[in-house]
Image (cartoon, grey):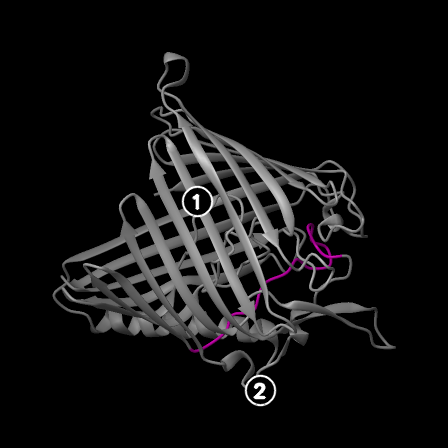
C-alpha cells in the first residue's frame, strides 16, 4: 500500500465510525454545523530555484465542522478539510482533522477517534508539540496539523490534570511536491517512507502528561515514547531515476516541559525537551516574554512586544535543524475594533549563520461572514550552510479570502 493511500486510510475509517455513531444516536439535544470556503493566492517575487515552480499559484479550500451532543456527557465532533492547488499536486489534499467521540463524568473524561492536541507556550517555535503530525504543505510555520488516531483519557484533580494517550497509528508528514514552493533541493518521495520499527506505521505510541497551575504559573510536563514526528530525510538514488529524498522515521523517547507565567503586563514563556533514540541524546529549549502596552496613544489598541530565543544542541551538523541558535522578536497589534483587526510582525535571526526571516501576518473581518488574511515572508542573507537556505528565493505575499458560516 502506498504512503499516500495509507495517509487516507485513517481519516476515512474515522469518518465511517463517526457517521455510524451519528445514525445510532437518539434523544438529540444539539446538532451544530459550521463551515468555511477560502480562496488563496501567492505572489512570489523571484523565480523558483528549480524548474516548473510558478510565481503565482492559487488554491481553494473547504472546511466543515459538525458538533453533535447526544447526551449531556456524550459528544461527537467532526472536522473535515480539503484543498485544491493549481500547481502542486502534493498540496491538493484532504484530511479528517477531527472525528472523535467524547464521554465525560465529574471525575474523568475519555475520547476516541481522530483528535487534535496542542502543547506549547511560546509564539514562534513550538518545540514540545508532539502528538499530532505537521501538515507541512499547508503552512510554512508548521502550525497546521493532521488528525491523529488516539485514545485520550483525562483525569482532573485539585492538584492538577493527568492525561494519558494511546496512539495506535502514525500519520506521515506531508511535503511539497516537485512543482511546489518551500521544498527541499531534492524532492521528498513520501511513497518511500521507511521506519525504524518493524511495525512501521502501525506502531503504538504512548504519552502521559501532567499539567497544573501554581499561583500565576501554568506548568506542563510530559513523556512521549514512539515514532518521531520529524523524519530524517535520506538520499535515495537509483540508476534509472533522478535522486530524491525519502523520510526515515525513528523511535524516540522524549521528555518535555512547558510553562507560562503572568506577572503584571508581562507574560513569561518557556518550552524544553530532552530526546533519546536518534544516535545520541540531545536537548532543545525556547523561552522568552510578551509585554503588553494597553491602550497605546490613548486608543483602544493594545501592542504586544515579543522576544524569544531558541537553542538546539544539534548545532554540530548532526541532524541539522532550522532552529538551532536563533533569536526572535515581534510586535503584535490588536486594534480591538468591531472587525477584529490584528497584525503580527516578527523577525527571526540565526545567530550563527546570520540568516534572517521577516514575517508579517494581518487579518480582519469584512462584514459578518468574510475574513481577509494577509501573510508575507522575506528570507534575507540566507547562508548556504543554513538548513533553511533552500528558502532563499521564496519571498512571498499571500492573500486569502475566507467565507464562513
In this rendering, position of residue 16 left or right of residue 281:
left
Along the viewing direction, whichever of 58 and 130 lies nearer the viewer: 130
Report which quarter residue 78 is drawn in.
bottom left
On screen, residue 5 above or below 69: below
Query: Residue 58's spot in the image, x, y percent?
Result: 62, 44
| Residue 365 in sight from this viewpoint | no
Could you say which disc has been placed on residue 198 in the image?
A: 2
Residue at position x 73%, y 40% from top? 354
Q: Residue at x 46, y 38 (%)?
A: 289
- Please name the residue shown 47% across and 52% down the image: 271
Asked whether residue 146 is in view, the answer is yes
Give 180 or 218, whichever is nearer the viewer.
Answer: 218
User: Which numbered tag is attached to residue 269?
Assistant: 1
- The magenta stretch spans residue 27: no
| Label 2: element kind | loop
Q: Position of residue 268 (x, y in %)?
A: 42, 40
Amino acid at each position: 500500500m502506498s504512503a499516500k493511500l495509507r495517509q487516507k486510510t485513517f481519516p476515512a475509517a474515522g469518518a465511517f465510525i463517526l457517521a455510524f455513531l451519528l445514525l445510532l444516536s437518539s434523544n438529540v439535544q444539539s446538532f451544530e454545523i459550521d463551515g468555511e470556503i477560502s480562496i488563496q493566492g501567492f505572489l512570489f517575487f523571484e523565480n523558483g530555484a528549480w524548474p516548473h515552480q510558478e510565481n503565482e499559484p492559487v488554491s481553494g479550500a473547504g472546511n466543515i465542522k459538525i458538533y453533535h451532543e447526544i447526551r449531556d456527557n456524550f459528544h461527537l465532533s467532526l472536522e473535515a478539510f480539503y484543498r485544491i492547488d493549481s500547481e502542486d499536486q502534493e498540496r491538493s489534499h484532504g484530511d479528517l482533522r477531527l472525528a472523535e467521540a467524547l464521554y465525560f463524568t465529574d471525575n474523568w473524561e475519555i475520547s476516541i477517534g481522530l483528535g487534535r492536541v496542542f502543547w506549547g507556550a511560546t509564539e514562534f517555535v513550538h518545540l514540545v508539540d508532539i502528538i499530532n503530525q505537521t501538515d507541512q504543505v499547508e503552512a510554512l510555520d508548521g502550525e497546521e496539523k493532521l488528525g491523529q488516531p488516539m485514545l485520550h483519557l483525562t483525569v482532573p484533580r485539585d492538584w492538577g490534570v493527568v492525561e494519558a494517550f494511546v496512539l495506535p497509528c502514525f500519520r506521515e508528514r506531508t511535503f511539497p511536491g516537485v512543482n511546489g514552493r518551500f521544498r527541499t533541493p531534492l524532492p521528498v518521495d513520501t511513497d518511500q517512507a521507511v521506519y525504524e520499527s518493524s511495525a512501521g506505521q502501525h506502531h503504538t505510541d504512548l504519552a502521559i502528561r501532567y499539567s497544573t497551575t501554581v499561583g500565576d504559573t501554568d506548568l506542563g510536563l510530559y513523556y512521549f515514547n514512539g515514532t518521531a514526528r520529524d523524519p530524517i530525510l535520506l538520499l535515495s538514488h537509483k540508476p534509472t531515476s533522478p535522486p530524491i529524498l525519502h523520510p526515515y522515521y525513528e523511535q524516540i523517547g522524549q521528555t518535555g516541559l512547558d510553562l507560562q507565567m503572568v506577572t503584571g503586563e508581562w507574560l513569561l514563556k518557556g518550552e524544553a525537551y530532552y530526546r533519546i533514540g536518534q544516535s545520541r541524546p540531545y536537548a532543545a529549549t525556547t523561552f522568552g516574554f510578551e509585554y503588553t502596552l494597553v491602550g497605546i496613544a490613548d486608543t483602544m489598541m493594545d501592542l504586544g512586544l515579543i522576544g524569544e530565543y531558541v537553542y538546539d544542541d544539534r548545532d554540530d551538523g548532526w541532524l541539522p535543524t532550522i532552529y538551532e541558535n536563533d533569536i526572535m522578536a515581534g510586535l503584535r497589534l490588536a486594534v480591538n475594533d468591531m472587525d477584529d483587526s490584528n497584525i503580527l510582525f516578527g523577525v527571526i535571526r540565526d545567530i550563527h549563520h546570520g540568516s534572517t526571516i521577516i514575517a508579517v501576518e494581518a487579518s480582519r473581518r469584512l462584514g459578518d461572514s468574510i475574513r481577509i488574511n494577509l501573510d508575507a515572508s522575506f528570507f534575507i542573507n540566507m547562508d548556504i550552510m543554513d538548513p533553511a537556505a533552500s528558502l532563499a528565493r521564496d519571498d512571498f505575499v499571500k492573500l486569502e479570502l475566507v467565507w464562513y458560516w
